[in-house]
Each structure stands twice: as C-alpha cells, then as structure tokens.
Image (spheres, rainbow, N blue to C red):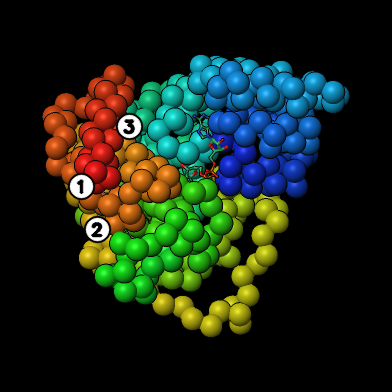
Amino acid sequence: MSNTQQLVILGATGSIGLNTLDVVARNSQLFSVFALAAGQNAKKMAELCIAHQPRYAVMASPSAAQQLSAHLANTDCKTQVMHGEHAMSELCAHADVDAVMSAIVGAAGLLPTLSAVEAGKKVLLANKESLVMSGQLFIDKVKQHNATLLPIDSEHNAIFQCLPPALQHAQNNQQLHRHGVSKILLTGSGGPFLNRDIDTLKDVTISEAVAHPNWSMGQKISVDSATMMNKGLEFIEAKWLFNCDADDIDVVIHPQSIIHSMVQYHDGSILAQMGNPDMRTPIAHALAYPERINAGVKALNFSDIVDFSFTKPDFNRYPNLQLAIAACRAGQGATTTVNAANEVAVNAFLNAQIGFTDIHKINAQTLDAANYSNVQSLDEILECDRLARLSAAQFITKVTQ
Ligand code: NAD
Ligand code: MG
C-alpha cells in the first residue's frame, strides 16, 4: 500500500495539466497519478502514460481512445484506456482517489468536476468556467458532500493565501467583513492590447490575440485574457469561492503580473501574494496545502523588477469585462449565458469566422436576447447553456453574412 496522494488530472495534455505533472514528478514521494483525462491529443497522452504510468487514461471520444491504445500497443505501459465523459466522472469519484485537478477547458469540465465534488474529494479548480456556469449549485454541493475546494487560478490562489484561515473556504459561510476584510483586489495584466490604439482592435489577428506578454496558456484563456473576459469570469469565480458580493471586488490592472492579487483589511493593511508568473506555484500550493513543496519556480528577484505599476481597467478597451461584471450582478442565468456565448464566440474567432471585437458583440447580443428567469437546478443550467450556445451561433451567422 502506498500512502502517496492518488490524483486524477482532467485536461492532462493542456497547459495546466502539463504543469501539474511537472510538479508531481518533482514530488513523486507525495503524489501518484491514478488517472489522466484529455480531449483529442492521443499522441501527447501516450507520452504522458509512458512517463507517468497511470492506472487509467480517458480520451473524450472513442476514436481518440483507439488512437491512444494503438500508440501504447507495443510499449510496456499497462494503462487501461477508456473514453467519454461518463468514464471521467466515474474515475473522479473512484474510492482510491484523493484529489482531482480540474483543468479541462470550458463547460466540458462541469460534469466530471461535479462528480469529484459529490464524492467529497479534494478538488483543485483551474476550470473556472464550471464554477461560473453553475455557481450556487457547485458551492452547495461542496458543502453538502464536504469536499475541499482549492483554487488554482493564480489570482484566486493568491487571494486564498492572503485571507485569514477562517475565510479561506466559501463552504464556511463566513462573511468577509466580519473577519476584517474590506475588499478583494483582483489583479490582471491587461493582456497584449493594454496600450494598443482602441480603433485598431477590430484588426487583431489570432496570433496577436494568443500571444500573452507574461503567461503561457491554452488558446481559449489566452483570447479571454486579451479581451479581459478572463478577468470577468474570475470576478464571478471570486464571488463564489469567497462568498462575497460584486461590491466587495475591485479589478486592478498590474501589467507586470508579479502581484497575483491582494486582500485589503479594515485597518488599512493590504496583503499581496507575489511571485514569478508561473502556474506551478498555485498548483504546488493547492496540491500540498497546508504544507509547502518545491514547484520548480525561480524565486522573484526584486532587483530585476524595473517597473511595478497599477491602473484602473478602461471598459471602452475591455467591454467584455464590464459585461461579465454586469452578468455577475444579474445572477446565475446571466453568468451561465455569458460563459456559453463567450465559449462559442472565442471558438469562432479562433476559427477565423469572426473578428476580435465581434467576440463582445456576440456575447452582448446573446445576453440581451436571453430569457433566463429561473436557472438553479443542473437541468436548468445545462438547458440555459444549450440555448445560449444556439443563440450565439445564430448571431455569429449574422456577423459572417
Ligand atoms: P489548454 O487548452 O492548454 O488545455 C485544455 C485541456 O482540456 C487539454 O488537455 C484538452 O485535451 C482538454 N479537453 C478539451 N476538451 C475536452 C473534453 N471535451 N473532454 C476532456 N478533455 C478536454 O487549456 P489550459 O490553459 O490548460 O486551461 C485549462 C483550464 O484552466 C481552463 O478552464 C482555464 O481557464 C484554466 N486556467 C488556465 C490557466 C493557465 O495558465 N493555462 C490559468 C488559470 C486557469
Ligand atoms: Mg487567472
């Protein structure tokens, strides 16, 4: 019997998945890979199976699973290959599993992540979209099943580290103000177009949009960072993770991405978490919490920092940020809708169907047209998500005509 923590890594072939495996490999006395799951990249998954020898590997489709089996056929890798969302959900709830890294991109991560929550696992949440999509239901399930929810998003992980322990978990039902907290300061770099002439944003190319100045990430979150929809989704994520209101959160632009977010207290203190922009820090923090382990990240050298600046976000430049904050105030149906519309719009941008500034147009039109009076149960959330995707696709057809 090993007493290492058994992990499931959802989204193993992606940016967060690979960074997680890097931290795990540096700390193999503490962690074992029980299962890996990913979408379509069978070749990469085969490499990961050979390197990490998980008990199971799950691909999203039967064809990708077949390819994976073919890649592993003439190796000594004994990993059992499976496919589909149901298999991912089952493995997340497996009795031998201690923790689940939720790092599938987009709404596809929701059901496997909820399965881990319902099984009372330690859930390391990178997939912010699942929380934005299902907010109250997600948090209620965390409480009901006594799951442990730890944020991987660098800002939320920073906020978590700066909060008093009694406030670190939304499931505690604690109020920020009663514990001396006056504000959460959510920082964001402003992405690649912080200083670009606003009139030229309509001409932004795909390669310009995915080239983030400080972070190396998957394509969808890179585009979300360029529009600052990412900060909008993070605003909603913070509301749920830290049991607070929209009025308790301010967004601050900090182009250097050294401070990863801050917490302001009633006595005038502001606590910040800092470090080089490398996702292995929040991943290592959450994996080992409450201990600290080696993440392979170089310590910050203050004498290397030439500039350290802060500004307010300009909603003319970042209308998606304003839209997401408005959706946060409007409630669950609005956040589910905006998340779904954005996923469809970003995908259309990445497929060269629409322009960069059309992403906001599609998101705003979908939100305006939506009728989402009662969105609480999982069925209502999934239906709201489905209708928003249909509606966004129709608005995209109009843009492309
Ligand atoms: P990525 O595109 O690099 O990786 C996505 C992963 O999800 C891949 O392994 C892909 O195969 C898998 N996937 C896609 N569709 C799937 C499906 N239907 N079923 C199973 N797996 C599927 O993305 P990423 O940058 O690693 O981001 C992953 C999540 O983490 C996102 O929700 C993102 O917002 C969040 N996040 C990422 C970063 C970062 O630095 N990359 C930071 C904070 C939060
Ligand atoms: Mg983030």
Mark seen at residue 364 = 1
Q: Is residue 135 left or right of residue 155?
A: left
User: Where, by quadrant of the figure, is residue 28 drawn?
Assistant: top right
Which SS class for mark 1? Answer: helix
Q: Does any portion of residue 172 appear in the rendered image?
A: no
CB at mark 3 closer than 8 A to ligand 1?
no
Neighbourhood count class around disc 2 (C-alpha, 10 Å): few under 14, some 14–19, many 20 upward: many
Amino acid type for the residue under numbered disc 1: Ala
* Residue at point 46%, 62% (across, down): 208
Q: Is residue 22 left or right of residue 306?
A: right
Q: Nearer the viewer, mark 3 or mark 2?
A: 2
* Residue at point 56%, 31% (across, down): 39
Answer above or below: position of 325 versus 115.
below
Q: Earlier in the sequence, mark 1 or mark 3?
A: 3
Give the percent coordinates (x, y) of residue 336. Answer: 28, 35
Residue that carries the numbered disc 3 in the rendered image: 134
User: Where, by quadrant of the figure, is residue 32 drawn?
Assistant: top right
